[in-house]
Amino acid sequence: MPIRVHPDIANLVPYSPGKPLDELERELGIHGAVKLASNENPLGPSPKAMAALTQTTATLHRYPDGGAHHLTRALAERWKVGADHVVVGNGSDEILSLLVKTFMAPGDEAVMADQTFVMYKLAVTGGHGICVEVPLKDWRYDLSAMARAITSRTRLLFVCNPNNPTGTVVTHEAVQAFMNTVPDHVIVVFDEAYYEYVRDPHFPNAVAYVQQGRQVAVLRTFSKIYGLAGLRIGYGVTTPEIVGYLQRVRNPFNTNTLAQHAALAALGDDEHVAASHAINETGMAAVDDGLRRLGFDPLPSQANFVYFDTRRDGHEVFTRLLHQGVIVRHIHGSMIRVTIGKPEENRRFLKALADVIGQCAVIDA
Ligand SMILES: *Cc1c(COP(=O)(O)O)cnc(C)c1O
């Protein structure tokens, strides 16, 4: 008997994380490649987190604290909610999958943008749900169109803010108008992985909706500004009712001891966060300026990456950059996303791009 697999699973395309640096360097016979592909912190992990890791190794024969007690309490205090409003996960990706697993039955719908974080589609389709994709409007989430896409089968609605890969945000005003129309049977998931990078004073306070008792889940992560992507730890701030259901579904030891301790230390490392924010600000200005000098029109970004139209075969641009030791992310068509790195990495990217665009034919729009 052959094994059976549901077509929803068979038809999934695995998430493509890109090759590890060392493997790529071996393959291409280069060294000193720069990775600007996954929106990681170019300054590395919080030094306080690294110190906490060293101190934690002696207790690794013990199971983790399944309730992530200290981290949960610290996060609750930080966001001025009760500890019963916080759930910690193996990356915010896990919380996302838990939301799908917990609240979606086969045939239920999740509303999302057509150009956004690919994990929503993977998680929902893998959970036998239906993805209702709403086109972006001027590269931004079209919240009124998303509200109109809600049906009685809608369980989740994802708002990636800032949006990956565009870097654009929806404002407080737009979110408020949207929240006034969203029915209570829909959980609105604000994915704020880049929250700590945002400068826009009109950025909404999504946690306030949780405090008001709305059906909202705010996802945050230690993978981006805190520099702990390799440890896999993120969290959700949501209602005690939703937390309660997620606690039933999650694995008992979903986050490991090292990750919990490092995250707690990183949360208290204001200096590292400030330095990471600052290097992103100057790097963003330099990359934006450099791209404009090369004739591109990058989208205004509130995150730690920039999205732009190469007006060429994006895969070819990506591949040629790769051969120059600069790894970016080809999203689709002519569109490329590049993470803001250290000043020398940004210069290296801009220089490589200047070389590469001379080698690729321009596509007429
Ligand atoms: C990077 C990222 C995350 C974070 O994922 P983790 O699982 O916490 O590493 C979540 N959402 C978006 C949009 C991201 O870009």
Image (tube, rainbow, N blue to C red):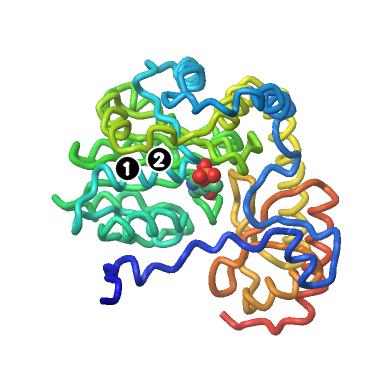
Residue 162 visible to an observer of this rendering? no
Identify the image quadrant of residue 177.
top left
Q: Residue at x 75, y 46 (%)?
A: 283
Q: Vertically, is 298 above or below 303?
A: below
Element class at badge 2: helix
Secondary element type, mark 1: helix
In the image, what residue type sits under mark 2?
Answer: Ile
Can you tell me whether the CB of the residue at mark 2 lies under 8 Å from the nearest atom of ligand 1? no
Q: Which numbered disc covers residue 95?
A: 2
Instruction: Pick whichever, 196 or 363, lies toward us.
Output: 196
Q: Is residue 47 visible?
A: yes
From the viewer's perspective, is residue 354 above or below residue 183?
Answer: below
Up the image or down, 80 lies above or below 158; here it is above
Instruction: In this rendered view, identify the residue nearer to me: 255 or 283.
Output: 255
Mark 1 crowd level (few <14, some 14–19, many ≥20, 10 Å Cα): many
Q: Which residue is mark 1?
A: 99
x, y percent for residue 186: 23, 42
| Disc 2 packing (10 Å; few <14; some 14–19; many ≥20) | many
Rounded to the nearest whole Å, what is the CA distance between mark 2 and mark 1?
6 Å
Amino acid, disc 1: Leu
Give percent across and percent down for residue 344.
85, 51
Residue 282 image-quadrant placement = top right
Position of the C terminus by quadrant: bottom right
| Residue found 67% across the figure and 52% down from its top | 339
Q: Quadrant of the N terminus?
A: bottom left
Residue extending farthest left? 152
Q: Residue at x 62, y 62 (%)?
A: 18
Task: Tell me if label 2 and label 1 are in contact, CB under 8 Å.
Answer: yes
